[in-house]
Amino acid sequence: MRKIYELSSHVADLIAAGEVVERPGSVVKELLENAVDAGASAVTAEIENGGMSYIRITDNGCGIGSQDVETAFLRHATSKIREEGDLAAIGTLGFRGEALAAIAAVSRVELLTRTAEEEAGTAFSLEGGVPGEKSTAGCPEGTTIVVRNLFYNTPARLKFMKKDTAESANVFSVVRSMALAHPEVSFRLLRDGREELHTPGDSQLISAVYSALGRNFALNLLAVDSACEDIRVRGFVTKPVSGHGTRGNQHFFVNGRYIKSRLLTAALEEAYKNQMMVGKFPGCVLHLDIRPDAVDVNVHPAKTEVKFVNERRIFDAAYTSVLHTLEADREAPALREREVRGPRTVSEPEYVQQELEGVPAAPAFSPAELQTGTRAFHTAVPPADSELKGDSRPLGEGNYASYRGGAADFYSVPATGGFPLRAASPPQDVKLVLTGTEIAADAVQPVTAPLPSTPEITAEDCVPGRFRVLGEALATYVIVEVTDGVLLIDKHAAHERMIFDRLRANPASVMAQRLLVPVVAELPREESAALLGNLPLLEEFGFEAEDFGGGSLIVRQAPGDIAAEEISSTLSELAGKLLAAGRTDPAARRDEVLHTVACKAAIKAGSRSSPEELRVLAEQVVSGRVKYCPHGRPVAIFLSRSQLEKQFKRA
Ligand code: ADP
Ligand code: MG
């Protein structure tokens, strides 16, 4: 046995410092928290070289009195708690009294501070935790701390630091989280002299969201605000139609503290269940205000993880609050359904409100229509400037007019004796059978070009592999008659699979297209860093992009099948997947890129397809070459003759 020694306080400090100060971002986090605890209304963070060589945090808070300056840098020295009992109800961000000591132990620190009561301020410095000069200095009320040469005396840790860009990205996300946690404080981040973030500090959460997460994110949110007993949940969640490619946009806060929580992620996503596409994730900025004694923040030195005393209650509160918000929003499609019936340009809520009263339900099939089959299903293309423009979604089940965008409506066509799917071409004299205003015929276009006529099936058609495309339903499903049954093919899923297989066999088959106008994709730091780290892989699939500064990428070339307006979202999705795949095997990363490109390049549900496209898809499915989409969902449903006969009570 070796002899046991007590470690010197210097070595003990270094070890303790390692827990609190992992990287530049953790220094910034601790110093910002101190500024907020000091009651600052404006805080500026400046970094150079990702924070490795220089970090400066300036606040206009209460300052540190001259007599307390040395004490503040001692381990377990704090002004925020006194006794054991205080631990049960912590109302400040800091309380462990470790941060300044830990930071000072592994860097060169300069402090400049003044309280309101003092005439002159105090300057103080430390090097590797060893106190240096203390002097009086003129300075405004508040505190400025400069941290230089982080980890200069711990070479082992220095080795673990990532590139400056990665550390900068981490600092950015730290400042962003603080800004979202404290809309009452104006935060500013300067990186190598350039302003990267600046929130107004006007106490409006949405202002902070707008400044910190960007316009795009801010415009696609629903407000959450509800209280379940003593748990208040407030903030914003993504509209179900605006899902993100990753979980990177989920920001949770408990009592003003940014936290990571699987529990809250699960609660959020549970609320979106069946409302958001597989592979899409809701974003959020959610604040939970709970009794301080209902949560333990003292489980992790960096305090990014918390322990809830009653997890079930927290889950339920978050889940029900979000669910209520989404449910309230779900009424919106129904409103739009009414909107379609009024004059098309009107979309003011008051108008819609009036319309709601006394508007009969959707017109049902009349017996006459059933007899003659004179009603066809077409897509009304809204005028370009209409509110209805935008994303199209597949129709909800049994709710024929509830989707946004290409609002589907019934209209009557002159009797042709055909059944709906056989309606030849868009009749010119069409009148909408809708309550209220009529819509001009030229606003209405058929889902596809004139459908091929469908003669009676003959014996020779009944050969395995024979098929006949009957048309397309709901701008999403190809209807195909095959031997002894009918196939309904999800055109997006089938097409996605085809592209996926083709790309996997031969990535060079991507038709890369130079963009006339380069697209600038504004992405979260982490995401753009992930993309920049995988440029060769992206190039292989036809992307040509480069750093455009401030987290943006400029894209000059992209796979031709991906629409220009889809490029940003495609890259964001890709980045998320690359981040998730991490440094694991390159094959997995390739597959992720394949998935994303295939999905984005595939025909969209809700879009119009030519008869030829429908035929090719049907052929692939009927031949058995395409069975499941790359996500494992089926691409087709088969209705056999006997199933149909049973349904119609013929059997
Ligand atoms: P803690 O925040 O856990 O109390 P720190 O080591 O971060 O521990 O800070 C020690 C003490 O120094 C704080 O309790 C506070 O009194 C003081 N202090 C630190 N930073 C500031 C600041 N920016 N403004 C005013 N006081 C500060
Ligand atoms: Mg602190």
Image (cartoon, rainbow, N blue to C red):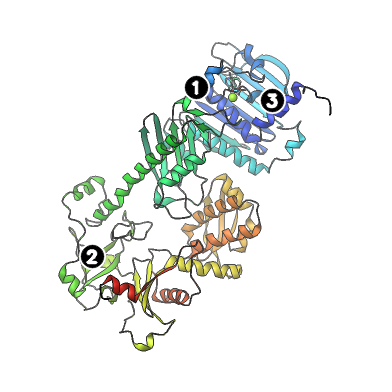
| Tag 2: amino acid | Ala
- If you read the primary sequence from the N terminus, does the residue marked by circle 2 or circle 1 appear first? 1
**Residue nearer the viewer, 357 or 540:** 357
Quadrant of residue 21 within the rendered picture: top right
The answer to whether residue 550 of the structure is visible from this angle is: no
Query: Can you tell which mark lies on residue 440?
Result: 2
Q: Position of residue 363 (x, y in %)?
A: 19, 61
Question: In the image, 381: left or right of 183?
Answer: left
Dot 1: few (<14), some (14–19), or many (≥20) neighbours within 10 Å?
A: some
| Tag 1: amino acid | Ala
Distance from disc 3 to disc 1, alpha carbons, whole Å, reads 28 Å
What residue is shown with label 3?
104
Residue in view at x 38 percent, y 57 percent: 391
Dot 2: few (<14), some (14–19), or many (≥20) neighbours within 10 Å?
A: few
Dots 2 and 3: beta carbons under 8 Å?
A: no
Q: Position of residue 17 (x, y in %)?
A: 68, 28
Query: Can you tell which mark lies on residue 514?
Result: none
Dot 3: few (<14), some (14–19), or many (≥20) neighbours within 10 Å?
A: many
Query: Can you tell which mark lies on residue 89?
Result: 1
Distance from disc 2 to disc 1, alpha carbons, whole Å, reads 66 Å
Q: Position of residue 285 (x, y in %)?
A: 45, 39
Distance from disc 2 to disc 3, alpha carbons, whole Å, reads 74 Å
- The quadrant the C terminus occupies is bottom left
Question: In the image, 606: left or right of 569?
Answer: left
Q: Position of residue 641 (x, y in %)?
A: 34, 76
* Residue occupying the far right of the picture: 2
Question: In the image, 213: left or right of 526?
Answer: left
